[in-house]
Image (tube, grey):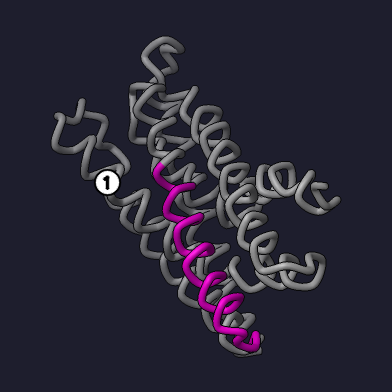
Amino acid sequence: MISFPLLFAAVIGFNHAFEADHVLAVGNIVNKRTNLKQAVRDGFFWGLGHTSMIFAIGCVIILGKAALVDSHFDFFEVIVGVSLVVLGGFRLARIRSYSKPGLSHYHAGHKLAYSIGLVHGLAGSGAVVLVAMSRLEHTFESILYLVIFGIGSILGMMVVAGVFNLPFSKKIKATDSFQVGLVLLSALLCIGYGGWMVVRYFI
């Protein structure tokens, strides 16, 4: 019989994708796309990277019976904050770059999305693994929870990527000034929120 937490693991994972740091990161990655399909793929690779890290750390903790140390995961949030500042700063520096990327840039974008997802998986892994270990009795169920949660988060990030790419899609045909304004706002929010994540660790 499937346990109660497993039934809602995908829903929890889907909702997890809409956390502020995740949305800001993906938004700044996909707002350079003019193709909705490519943006959704960015969301997929971001979610895959996020899931890969959580699954890897989760397996080490669950199978190795290791203890969760909150201070380690708090420091991981600093790394996430720094990544947001760098990502926002880079996007800000190239705010007027709307040239159509070639195929190599598409692949580079997917690699960037996967890498940023990996970093964000560090900060989110502690809470997710703790839920899996505290609410499930068996090791297999705990690992299965991580897998189902990961699938939900991947789907959620694909939705986030698609929604935030809409103003930049060729089909919408938004004005350049409107697009530049959105990129500027997104980049500044990314830098601001990332800076806050770093500062609050030392307060």
Residue 150, image x and y in percent? 57, 50
- The reply, left or right, for residue 136 in relation to residue 147 is right
Instruction: Please name the amino acid that badge 1 sits on.
Output: Arg
Residue 85 drawn above or below residue 25: below
Task: Name the dominant secondary structure of the magenta segment.
Answer: helix
Residue 122, image x and y in percent? 51, 70
Residue 167, image x and y in percent? 48, 23
Residue at 34 percent across and 28 percent down: it is: 38
Membership of 176 in magenta stretch: no
Residue at 57 percent across and 63 percent down: it is: 193
Residue 21, image x and y in percent? 57, 57
The magenta segment: 45-68
Instruction: Identify the element where label 1 is drawn.
Output: loop
Q: Residues within 10 Å of mark 1 (few under 14, many from 20)?
A: few
Observer-nearest of 128 and 116: 128
Residue 43 drawn above or below residue 52: above
Membership of 58 in magenta stretch: yes
Quadrant showing the C terminus: bottom right
Residue 105 drawn above or below residue 195: above
Q: In this view, which residue lies farthest toward the right?
A: 4
Residue 53 drawn above or below residue 166: below
- Residue position for label 1: 94
- The reply, left or right, for residue 20 in relation to residue 107 is right
Observer-nearest of 15 and 144: 144
Residue at 49 percent across and 35 percent down: it is: 161
- The reply, left or right, for residue 150 in relation to residue 2 is left
Tell me which corner region of the image, top left, top right, bottom left or bottom right, holds residue 143: bottom right
Observer-nearest of 172 and 26: 26
Residue at 28 percent across and 37 percent down: it is: 96
